[in-house]
Amino acid sequence: MSLYPKRWQIAPPITPSHVARFPDLHPVMVQVLYNRGVTDPHEARAFLNGDGGEGNPFDLAEMPTAVTRLRQALRAGEPMAVYGDFDADGVTATALLVQTLRALDGHVHPYIPHRVDEGYGLHTDALTMLAQHGIRVVITVDCGVRSLPEITHANSLDIDVIVTDHHSVGPELPAATAVIDPKRHDSQYFFHELSGVGVAFKLAQALLRSHRQTPVTKREVRLEEKDLLDLVALGTVADLVPLVSENRTLVHRGLAQINRRERPGIEALCRQSGLKNGVIDARTIGYVLGPRLNAAGRVAHAKLAYQILETKYPAEAERLAIELDQLNYERRQLTQDIQQRARHIALAEDDDPPLLFAAAPDFPAGIVGLVASRLVDEFYRPAIVVEIGPEESRGSARSIPEFHITQALDECADLLTRHGGHAAAAGFTVPNQHLDQLTSRLRAMAAQQLTDREPTPTLSIDAEVQLSQVSGGLYQELTRLEPCGYANPSPLLLSRNIQVQNQWAVGNAGKHLKVTLSDGTIIWDGIAFRQGDWAGKLPDRIDIVYHLEINHWNNTSQLQLNIQSIRPTGWDDAVTQEFNPGGSEPGGAP
């Protein structure tokens, strides 16, 4: 590992005249907003208030058809099933729609496939079993848009399927009663990047609003849309969809709901994780709550995560929270072990491959995606990790912005049983006899697209500031950018010519680097995660790129620098590249 592997892209500074248009905001905040394309004071006010807009659910293609069919099922008492996925997005979506349909007096059952025994998506055997149990309507969540033969099979069983999904669509839509996916090629919906639970929430919205206009049951329906937003926030953040536009609105509102801890399962998860009231943000979901929900499907069965979200009983929630915490610990240990083996396999023939590919019979299906992500983080190359089965193998792929992994798999569709995903993440099933050919094709595509580009991870730096200009007041103002995540990252600041006063390793086995820094005016504590090997080796003067964050430790809270990258002062800035996401010339008026 190197201290200096990342390209620094520093946003061009905005003009004083632009800063003057925002008299109530810190100049650094104005710069950060500009970098995110927010250049108008009215837009800034809406953005900072968490108002990214919210669409009418009936604007989604085939939503009226879906609502009509579900209202028919509710009135007739037809048995229904919500068919989910085993990750946090699918589990929250399943819980959300089951809760909604039961509130409307529906006879509905959850079905979440087992990751190892069944794998992702719809399965004909599961649909046959549901038909044998009298299910007449199946609503998919976070899956189904590419399940053409499975939905044809459901039709032969007289099951009506309503697809709610957010994954990229194939060349043909399935022959379902309705297909609700904002990524449909004919979609007129204003926002295309909803999560799976976000799409499920739009269906729940449509059902509840339709019921308010024309009641579908005589029973009092106490459920309101806002009661579901905690689930929306959990699944949306955990699925790493862009936290902009409607996603930002839903997560902003959902975080407030989560921090009220009205759902027993969320309360139990927070307590088991040692989280205090009012501190849950998008980062907490991503690093604490989301992994525990995902651990169930990765190590055991995702129904445990569903149960903790669905239960009304605090004692049951507490028991499930303890079990999920233990599963998450097992997941971490297993991921570390498999990562070492996958690295060895991927580098066995080439120590600098354009695409890392590792496959083995004992790679657990629930871990391969995590391991692929770790390999991408380590090598900044696309990575695919595969569990080899008796006849078919299942793989997870993670990628970098320079290589669209789902498009690459599309070009290999003739080799695959099924596949789907996004630009940066995908999954697939492949017959074993095609595994070598798939490996060769994907490596060739990556070599063609990446060899001349020399992809390097890039840090997009929002502003260069003097360390003495950084304060608690600036931190408090920057927190208004929350929820931060994909497409709305936490602000990155750059400070130069900083004196290193102290440096030492901390954490388990000295894994992290702790520093005391000064610019001659002020002293700051900083932490550089996973850089403990550099303790005692830093030069006296450094330039740093960092986030501001609160460190909660031993019942104390202290503002610190979360250091993302370090260079010796005077390092050659020739690799520093400017970017101009605000849309105007560097230094020019927006």
Image (cartoon, grey):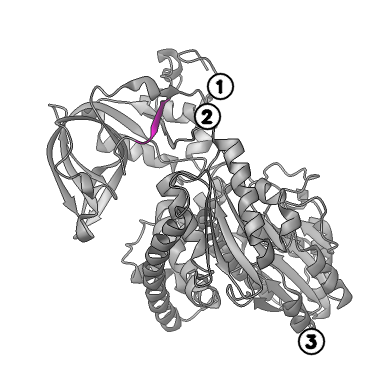
Mark 2 residue crowding within 10 angstroms, few (<14) / some (14–19) / many (20+): many
| Kind of residue at disc 2 | Val
Residue 195 among magenta residues: no
Give the extent of the magenta segment: 5-10
Q: Quadrant of residue 339?
A: bottom left
Q: Main secondary structure of the magenta part?
A: strand
Q: Residue at x 67, y 54 (%)?
A: 166
Question: Element type at marker 2?
Answer: loop
Closer-to-camera residue (582/504): 504
Between residue 574 and residue 33, name the one nearer to us: 574
Q: x, y percentage for residue 396?
A: 57, 59
Above or below, 231 against 535 in this view is below
The residue lying furthest to the bottom in this view is 133
Residue ID for mark 1: 583
Tag 1: Cα neighbours inside 10 Å, few (<14), some, or many (≥20)?
some
Of the residues shown, which amino acid type is indicated by label 1? Gly
- Does the CB distance between marks 2 and 3 fall below 8 Å? no
Q: Is residue 206 left or right of residue 114?
A: right
What's the distance in space between the residues labelled 1 and 3, CA to CA?
A: 58 Å
Mark on residue 132?
3
The residue sitting at the front extreme is 349
CA separation, marks 2 and 1?
A: 10 Å
Q: Which mark is residue 38?
A: 2
77, 361: nearer the viewer: 361
Of discs 2 and 1, which sits in the foreground? 1
Check disc 3 and give the amino acid type.
Gln
> x, y percentage for residue 262?
46, 68
Q: Is residue 373 above or below residue 29?
A: below
